[in-house]
Image (spheres, rainbow, N blue to C red):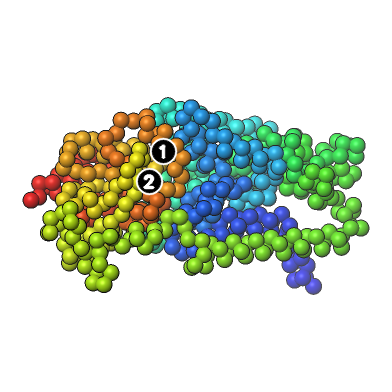
Amino acid sequence: MRALNWIKNHLPTQRRLIQVYAALLYNANLKGYISGEIYTGSTKAVCVPGLNCYSCPGAVGACPLGALQNALASSGNRAPYYMLGILLLLGLTLGRTICGFLCPMGLLQELLHKIPTPKLKKGRITYVLSYLKYVILVVFVVLIPLWYVSQRYPVPAFCKYICPAGTFEGAIGLLSNPANAGRFSMLGILFTRKFIIMVLIFGASVFVYRAFCRFLCPLGAIYGLFSKINLVGVKVEESKCTHCGLCVGHCKMDVRHVGDHECIHCAGCVDVCPTAAISFKAGSVTLCAHAKDEAPRQPRLNRKRCAAWCAALLVLAAALVYYNLPAAATPAGDPPAEAITPDHTEPETGEPETPASTKEDAVLPEIAVGSEVGNLGPDFSVPLYGGGTFTLSDTLGTVTVINFWATWCTPCVAELPHFDELYRNYDGSVEVIAIHSDLITDDVDAYLENYDYSIRFALDDSGVVAAYGGSTMLPQTIVLDKDGVIVYNTVGSVTYEQLEALVAPLIAEE
């Protein structure tokens, strides 16, 4: 009997089950944890409601906060209407109910808070600190990205400098996989600072209920702006309320009244209210009411909840099948066969055929085709921005430098001038092609109009990055000699001096 009572007292609540469900649904790409790769399929263009890092190996959608910063960083003179519309829709319908039910970071903080330690209760200091997240929203999510727009240098400041979800789900989620062991060399002081921030936030969550959510999260700050008008959440029937203050005293958040901008609509106050004035509603539909009011309708409510959970589990099962079966949901970054197999390779013999436009000895038949150093680089054709097509095999006889980049990748943008300088200094002796990732391609043409680059820019519409062993980690640089053999293939930033040291000896070779 004692064991049964213990099990009954420790069963997860409905809210906890929803939190776990949301975390699983956001990260349904379980095979990403095995392969160490980020999912890049079509659903990655859709934002999930809660804070869930785009770079998490399991993530199947984008983070609204990261998407907003990227939209601001690449907006130029135009407002990011798409992202503002999504946040407006989420705020009007759910508001901070997302924080209480649909945010994986909220779930993680609550689990950390369950660790048995002395706890810091809310008070005047925590209430004042709760406004810090609005400062972070204005400075790191809005002002810094917009300021860097004027510098033509995209910086999603909150994601880059603070976000613990990015460090925990993205960086650690990827680096913990043995397949990404070579990425450790890319880490620097920025990762060290973010790792320390993450440890401090998670450590604080053990002693302070939802420390990040209350004091630092700008996404919660955005949703809090809709506290008076969001459709779904806890509502107070004023005619029944006696203003006794039990609901505010019971709540662990820094609320001044039920449903204000600090309320996460967890519904913990519903059963505390002695007059049953508080209920959890979706518009005029009551989803959760005081226990004594709910009892007469319990059988019908149970049937409805059972049907809802069955439907939700079917959705989760379908998502797990879609994202994890080998034949399902091929990511957008996976190359088609023609992108991997060079056009100048005979299928019957596997020996490369010399293109008519090159010398007979330009291609070495004994060299294998692949992305490794020493292999013949896979041939490809990609569309150029501004018109035309770039085909790799047309450059045989010339040293070729390939750069994989994106407008939203800060290190990528920072090193583009090095490639342009290399091309100008070795005019005619080096071919340079900068290939933009196909994950997010909005406004690339408009971005390039702000610069006077001499190198050519193309779009990866045929899986070139994957054909050269790359992934969603940018930037990546490949150097091929005059025969099309790879002599350098590395993810990470490069300097002009490094590029010149790689290219100059190859140009000097007869």
Q: Which of the pair 323/147 is nearer the observer?
A: 323
SS of the residue under disc 1? helix
Q: In which quarter of the image is residue 181?
A: bottom left
SS of the residue under disc 2? strand
Q: Residue 238: horizontal and vertical position, in percent?
A: 87, 36
Q: Which of the pair 319/294 is nearer the observer?
A: 319
Q: Which of the pair 389/363 is nearer the observer?
A: 389
* Residue under label 1: 444
**Residue at 63 percent of width and 32 percent of height:** 131
Q: Which of the two labelled residues, at mark 2 and mark 1, occupies the earlier sequence position? A: 1
- Does 459 sit left or right of 499 as displayed? right
Q: Which residue lies furthest to the front in this view?
A: 356
Q: Which residue lies furthest to the left in this view?
A: 510
Count of numbered circles in the view: 2
The answer to whether one can see residue 183 in this image is no
* Residue under label 2: 459
- Does 42 sit left or right of 460 as displayed? right
**Residue at 75 percent of width and 44 percent of height:** 233
Amino acid at the residue labelled 1? Val
**Residue at 39 percent of width and 43 percent of height:** 406
Crowdedness near tag 1: few (<14), some (14–19) or many (≥20) residues, C-alpha within 10 Å? some
Q: Residue 112: horizontal and vertical position, in percent?
A: 60, 53
Q: Residue 453: horizontal and vertical position, in percent?
A: 29, 34
Q: What separation in Å lies between label 2 and label 1 (alpha carbons)?
A: 9 Å
- Does 366 sit left or right of 254 as displayed? left
Amino acid at the residue labelled 2? Leu
Q: In which quarter of the image is residue 95?
A: top right
